[in-house]
Image (tube, rainbow, N blue to C red):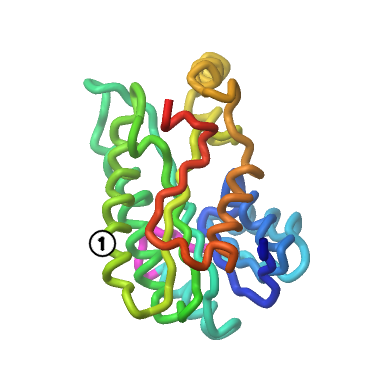
């Protein structure tokens, strides 16, 4: 299986921590020049130092078209193209019905839906035949569970947007797929549960057919597969990397 990404130019949004950083690290290990983005330059600097090699960190807010336009202008000037785009930036807020506030909805839809649209649409002029777009979804698109209704709604929206985009990209040679992780052992997952982190992790572990949650490196392996020529005839799928939880 050819996962070689030598001389590929890859962008990972939200690439300074968690799943995004794991994907960036694996892309770099396979030979890609990786550009990681995020809103905090200090976090990006730390990520770039850890990635080493030819990694680059460029601050950008995916919910703002002007910020992404500046990112892509710099990428075009420095690299001329994008071969791999990983739209990973996103997040969720736990809130049960009755406690959902406007800020919860605005924040999650701005990043998880609007941000994906702006990220992919802005990259189009730099994507050519053979380019791969990987959008990080979530099993919450099918089974959000208690307190995650808004987050699940944003991920379901992304799935349906991609169904349309597959047709709209006909003839371009650009592939687009969704990678939907199940619960994954990241700092953001623990932070989402707040003071109930251990309870929450135990609940998620109990639901897993494999008896555990995922590791960021496992999600990264699937992302690199979708980014590489090994998946050259895979287009428009939603790949669940969840230990079988979505099928249980």
In this orientation, which residue lies closer to the viewer: 109 or 202? Answer: 202
**Is label 1 in a helix, a strand or a loop?**
helix
Residue in the image at 28% along x and 57% along y: 161
Instruction: Indicate the quadrant where residue 92 lies.
Output: top left
Quadrant position of the N terminus in the picture: bottom right
Q: Position of residue 24 (x, y in %)?
A: 63, 57
Instruction: Examine the structure image and report whether residue 60 is included in the region drawn in magenta.
Output: yes
Residue in the image at 73% along x and 71% along y: 54
What are the residue bounds of the magenta stretch? 59-66
Disc 1: CA contacts within 10 A as few (<14), some (14-19) or many (>=20): few
Inspect this view and state whether residue 107 appears: no
Q: Position of residue 62 (x, y in %)?
A: 41, 59
Q: In the visual, does 66 lie left or right of 242?
A: left
In this orientation, which residue lies closer to the viewer: 237 or 138? Answer: 237
Q: Look at the picture and state if 173 lies above or below 37.
A: below
Residue in the image at 52% along x and 41% along y: 241
Residue for badge 1: 164
Inspect this view and state whether residue 164 appears: yes
Q: In the visual, does 87 lie left or right of 142?
A: right
């Amino acid at each position: 299986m050819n996962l070689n990404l030598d001389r590929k130019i890859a962008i990972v949004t939200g690439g300074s921590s968690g799943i995004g950083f794991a994907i960036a690290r694996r892309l770099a290990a396979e030979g890609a020049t990786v550009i990681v983005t995020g809103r905090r330059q200090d976090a990006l600097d730390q990520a770039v130092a850890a990635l080493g090699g030819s990694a680059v960190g460029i601050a950008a807010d995916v919910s703002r078209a002007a910020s992404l336009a500046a990112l892509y202008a710099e990428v075009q000037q420095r690299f001329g193209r994008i071969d791999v785009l990983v739209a990973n930036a996103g997040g969720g807020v736990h809130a049960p019905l009755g406690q959902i506030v406007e800020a919860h909805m605005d924040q999650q839809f701005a990043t998880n839906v609007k941000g994906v649209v702006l990220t992919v649409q802005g990259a189009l002029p730099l994507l050519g035949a053979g380019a791969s777009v990987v959008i990080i979804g979530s099993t919450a698109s099918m089974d959000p569970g208690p307190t995650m209704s808004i987050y699940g709604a944003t991920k379901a929206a992304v799935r349906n947007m991609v169904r349309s985009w597959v047709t709209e990209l006909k003839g371009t040679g650009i592939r687009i797929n969704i990678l939907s992780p199940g619960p994954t052992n990241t700092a953001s997952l623990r932070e989402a549960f707040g003071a109930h982190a251990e309870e929450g992790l135990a609940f998620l572990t109990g639901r897993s057919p494999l008896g555990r949650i995922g590791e960021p490196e496992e999600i990264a392996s699937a992302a690199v597969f979708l980014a590489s020529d090994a998946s050259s005839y895979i287009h428009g799928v939603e790949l669940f990397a969840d230990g079988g939880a979505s099928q249980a």
